Image: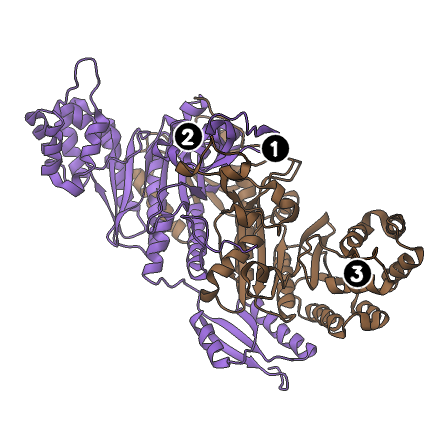
Chain colours: A purple, B brown
């Protein structure tokens, strides 16, 4: 039977050139994060369908690749709904499996547990350019550390890594979910009687600041029924807050009792400490408009912006309540995820040269070379390889000129020819 | 909602200690194979269900994790069979996806294409100790190389890798599917009129030689209806063939015209060349009883035996007809696969020490350390980390003695304490 040649819809074959960059990035990520005391861990790609459908995943839960039950458990004629047919699904992120892993293995894990996960996740999103249905995620998380030491180490580790990947002009923007809420409280937003203030609705509008500007946000909030005075009082805060720790302090002064002092002090300490101990060239900026989509965040949040790339190339924050909700055991947690696929894409686009990847050698062997001579040649290759050389031995083709051009294009900088009737040397 | 804490049936959470070994092995495998000119490639974990059900996978096709269609394509009420419900499956090996990949991308790939694949595969096998339903495979394949240079390089690369992983006493046993058939022909096995000789049936019996012995094989073949004289003539060949290239030559002499001379000469050249150019300490042995299960092999076959481990820890061979059957374009191919999970298991059992993994340092920070001092401490850590040190900074616990014991158990060889009221130095 003829085969379907293309990969399944929305997923891709990865060619050697991209793989080289991926392998290099994966190696560097593991090495760098291990220097910060993170340890690798892994969960199966298949997860219980119940765990994937527990409402932690938001919109992603609609995008699950579901796995059919097998054997006797699959009762095709009795099945009434999709749920009767499936018992597993491909994970759509690494955070839900991390919670399960931690609750399953906490006794055997150190405390705090500094986890490094690199793994594929799957989402049946509408296919679009540059976005795939299988992609690699790269997360570091610190579980069991309630202090800002977690935030500081996560930001330092991530920025050091980006620096090693030769990224320079990037900014890590930080904010705190509790400051976001305090600003709403201070401005005096109200809710219809019997309801609570719609923080998330206000944040969704605020999140559009970079697209629609301050004036656009103002119009949208007033359009949603909030009083002009409240909205202006709210937006005035953003005008005053400079993107540094002085901005945080000024804001804290204005907000007064609405914001407990420890929250703003901690955020300042995170900024100042990172600024003082950073290894890479980048900026840390306070951004009171930073929202982060997921509602599970409870404290500091952060996001990486890069000039080369319009959007975010990573982000994270503190989510102290999530693990407890799953396991019944309250566990402080904080994580930082980098957009591995975007980083690979950026490296590919700028034709990134992998350090130490030079110096591949090709040995061209004439057809009909006697076994004994071939043996000599392989012994020579052995010596060179054991000293670290990269050598590919291939048969010489009729169109040798074309073959050499091809090898050069593949990155072979030295090409040596060996003939059946000449000495091997 | 409470979460299911265990991983799905038959799959496992991988703990830090095992991950350390896996990460190390993966790094070493990629580095070693790249020295032999192999390039990484990757296919999606999800494959078209049609490609997975094309009869190339043998028994594995019964063990597929199938993926439910999504959206409008899923017609639950109209579906009559399983096939109506699914459009994809998790790959059960890396060879079928390699064929698809090669046919999809051949124009952009070098010729010969020396592929390195490391990736998870899934099989819904009956769960049993030490065997999991998700496991990593590690394959190297050379596509487009018809000569024994392919076999030689595959064996040298694989054995060099095993040597680097500190395996010594292993044997690579080799044989050739065409010798296997010639021996059957020579002995004079016959088939009922109108049928062809049941080579595969005879090989299944032969394959049991190490379990049931020569006498057991004899009984089984006679029991299957073959004449005593034929069977004895067949088994006599195995008695005569010594496990070296002299054995191949002797066998070739006896078989005469039944076996084209080039086949035995090539196998001798493979053995002699590998013996002469090998980097690791291991033996190459001719084993005329070596069968290898898969019927797609067409030429030389090989398998790794290791004293430490009863069974095979890897194997491969030439499969010149498989890719053409899929793509319509005949392509010579030869591959070698190592049992990654078995190798990791062996390294774990012998408490393998990863070279260069010593020297992890823990910084214990007293609670309430002022931000400025924390900054100094992080700066110091930065300097040491940038010189290659592995440092984990953690808050000091009330039970410091227990904390230190735990850190020592995790492999921290140096533990430094920093107090809020003392100088950082």
A191 sits to left or right of B242:
left
- The answer for how far apart the CA atoms under marks 2 and 3 are is 59 Å
Q: Can residue B176 be seen in this view?
A: no
Farthest residue toward the top?
A: A194
Residue designated by label 1 = A71
User: SS for tag 2?
Assistant: loop
| Horizontal and vertical percent position of residue A127 | 36, 46
Q: Single out the mark in the foreground, 1 or 3.
A: 1
Position in image of residue B13 (x %, y %) = 54, 36
Residue B288, disc: 3
Neighbor class of circle 2 (other Cα within 10 Å; few <14, some 14-19, many 20+) is: some
The picture quadrant where one finds residue A301 is top left
Q: Mark 1 lies on which chain?
A: A
Quarter the N terminus of chain A occupies: bottom right
Both marks 1 and 2 on one chain: yes
Look at the numbered disc 1 and give the secondary structure of its residue. Answer: helix
Residue farthest bottom in this picture: A421
Give whichever of A384, B235 is nearer the camera: B235
Residue to which mark 2 is pinned: A144
């Amino acid at each position: 039977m003829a085969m379907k040649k293309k990969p399944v819809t929305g997923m891709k074959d990865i060619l050697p050139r991209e793989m080289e960059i991926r392998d290099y990035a994966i190696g560097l990520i593991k090495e760098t994060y291990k220097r910060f005391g993170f340890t690798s861990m892994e969960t199966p790609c298949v997860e219980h369908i119940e765990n994937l459908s527990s409402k932690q995943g938001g919109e992603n839960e609609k995008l699950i690749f579901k796995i059919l039950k097998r054997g006797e458990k699959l009762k095709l004629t009795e099945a009434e709904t999709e749920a009767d047919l499936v018992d597993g699904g491909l994970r759509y992120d690494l955070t839900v499996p991390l919670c399960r892993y931690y609750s399953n293995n906490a006794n055997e894990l150190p405390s705090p547990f500094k986890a490094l996960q690199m793994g594929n996740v799957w989402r049946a999103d509408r296919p679009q350019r540059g976005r795939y249905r299988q992609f690699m995620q790269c997360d570091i998380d610190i579980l069991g550390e309630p202090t800002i030491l977690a935030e500081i180490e996560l930001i330092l580790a991530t920025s050091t890594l980006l620096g090693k990947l030769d990224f320079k002009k990037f900014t890590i923007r930080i904010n705190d979910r509790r400051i976001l809420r305090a600003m709403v409280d201070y401005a005096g937003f109200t809710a219809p009687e019997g309801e609570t203030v719609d923080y998330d609705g206000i944040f969704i509008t605020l999140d559009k600041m970079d697209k629609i500007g301050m004036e656009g946000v103002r119009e949208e909030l007033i359009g949603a029924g909030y009083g002009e005075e409240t909205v202006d009082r709210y937006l005035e805060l953003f005008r005053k807050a400079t993107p540094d720790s002085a901005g945080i302090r000024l804001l804290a002064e204005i907000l007064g009792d609405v914001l407990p002092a420890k929250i703003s002090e901690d955020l300042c300490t995170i900024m100042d400490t990172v600024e003082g101990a950073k290894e890479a060239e980048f900026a840390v900026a306070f951004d009171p408009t930073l929202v982060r989509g997921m509602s599970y965040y409870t404290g500091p949040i952060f996001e990486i912006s890069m000039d080369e790339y319009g959007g975010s190339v990573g982000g994270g924050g503190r989510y102290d309540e999530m693990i407890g909700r799953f396991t019944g055991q309250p566990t402080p947690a904080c994580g930082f995820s980098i957009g591995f696929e975007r980083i690979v894409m950026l490296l590919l686009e700028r034709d990134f040269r992998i350090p130490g990847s030079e110096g591949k050698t090709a040995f061209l062997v004439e057809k009909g070379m006697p076994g004994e001579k071939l043996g000599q040649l392989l012994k020579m290759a052995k010596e060179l390889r054991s000293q670290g050389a990269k050598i590919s031995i291939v048969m010489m083709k009729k169109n040798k000129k074309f073959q050499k051009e091809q090898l050069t294009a593949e990155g072979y900088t030295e090409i040596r020819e060996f003939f059946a009737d000449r000495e091997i040397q």
